[in-house]
Amino acid sequence: MPKTAMQMRLYSAQRNAANGQSLSGKTLGFEYYKNNGQTKSHVHNEFESGAAEDIYFRADGSKESSQDYFPAARGMNASQLRSKAEFALDGSTYTKHEVYTQTGLLERRGQLLGTGLYQQSYYCADGASLKRDRLFDAGKHFLSEKIFDCSSKKLIAEVFPGQYESQVYITLYREDGSKLAYTTKDYAGLSGTLFAEDGVTAIGEFSSSSSAMNIQYYDGSPERITQSWTSFYGRTKIIVFDPNTQKKLYLQEWKERPGDSPGLKKLILVKVTEYSQDKDNDWSREVEMSSDGKSIATVTRPLGSTPLAGLSLAKSPATEADFESKRRIMRLTWSFDKSDRLIKFELAFENQSFNNTEQPLQSALPAPRDISAERLLLPKHVELPVFEDLGPERIYDYP
C-alpha cells in the first residue's frame, strides 16, 4: 500500500496592532496532519521568549505527549529539553513527566502507578540522587512524602497530611535509621515527642515556635522528669530534677551570644541556682557568672543558721536581734574578679547591705565556690531536631 503523505501547515501568531506583540506569546507554529490533512498529529510552537514546544496527538485528537524546550542561550543547544510528558486517553491526565535543568540534569519526575496513585520524585543537584518522593491519590490529594539526605542518601523524614490543610505529621530519623522524633507542624510551630537512640523509647516532649521553645526530658515516663527547658527571645532556663523525688536540683540561666547568626548561636551561662533537698523550692546557693560565662563572678547563699559572732561589719543594724528576726531573708554574697580573687563580701537585706571592710572573712567564713563542674555546663540531652521544610508546596504540580 502506498504511504499516506504527511501534510504541514504554517501559521503566524496574531499580533497586537498597536505594538506588534504576539497576543499568545507565540511567534510561529507548524501543524502536521495525516490522512490527507484530516488528522492533526503534531504541533510545533515557537515563542517570543525563545522557548519552543512539540505536542503530539492520537488519531482521536486527544493529546498523547509533549516536549518543552529552553530558550536557546550562548553555548546551549537550541533544542535543549526542559520537560516531557505523556498523557492518558483523556488527553489531560499525566501518566508520566520529567523536568530537566538547563544543564540537562534530571530535576524531577512523575508517574502514574497502577493503583491510581501518582508519584512525584525530586532529585538532588547531581540529577541522580533522590531528594523527595511524594504520593498523591487519584483525586490529586497529597498522601505522603519521604525526604532523603543528598550526601548520605539516607531517609531523614517522612511527612503525612494532618487534620487540616496547614497541618502535617513528620517523623524524623537519625542517620542509622532509628526514629529521632515524631512531630506535628502547623501554623503555630512544631510539637512532638523525642526518642532515645533505640528509636523506640520516648525520652521527652517539646513544642517550639519562632520565638519560644519548651522541652521536658524524662526517664522512662512523663512522671519522671529529668530536665525542663524553656527558651524565649534569646534566654534559656534549664531546670534539672531528681527523677526519683521530682525535686529541683538546680536551675541554669543562659543567654545567646550577641551577634551570632541564626542557627549558629552560642549559649553563655549567666547564673546557676541550687536548691535544698530538705525543703521544696528553697534555694541553697546562687552562682552568677562573668559576662563571658567563663568564670564565677559572685556566690550568694541565704544567711540561714550562719553564726553572726566574729563578723566585723562596717555598718550594723541597731541590735543583733534585728539580724535574728530577719535571718531567713538575709543573704551572704562573695564577689570575685576574673582571677578568682575575693574582692568583696556582703551581707544584704532588701535594699540594705552591710559590707565587711576590716578583715578578709574567707578565713572565718569560706566562700562556697565548690559547685560541681557539670552544673556549669549544658546538661546531657538529645538536641531538639531542626526541620527546615524548604521543599516545593505539596500539591499535584506540573511542570
Image (cartoon, rainbow, N blue to C red):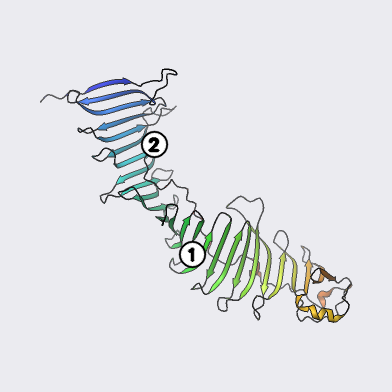
Residue 154 coordinates in the image, percent (x, y): 42, 55
Disc 2/disc 1 C-alpha distance (Å):
41 Å
User: Tag on residue 373?
Assistant: none
User: Tag on residue 104?
Assistant: 2
Mark 1 or mark 2, which is nearer the start of the sequence? 2
Q: Is residue 131 above or below residue 342?
A: above
Residue 278 coordinates in the image, percent (x, y): 65, 81
Quick check: 47 left or right of 370? left
Residue found 85% across the figure and 73% down from its top = 360
As drawn, the residue found furthest toward the left would be 1
Q: Nearer the viewer, mark 2 or mark 1?
A: 1
Of the 4 image quadrants, the one containing the C terminus is: top left
Of the 4 image quadrants, the one containing the N terminus is: top left
Quick check: 156 left or right of 360? left
User: To which residue does mark 1 refer?
Assistant: 194
Q: Is residue 294 above or below residue 59?
A: below
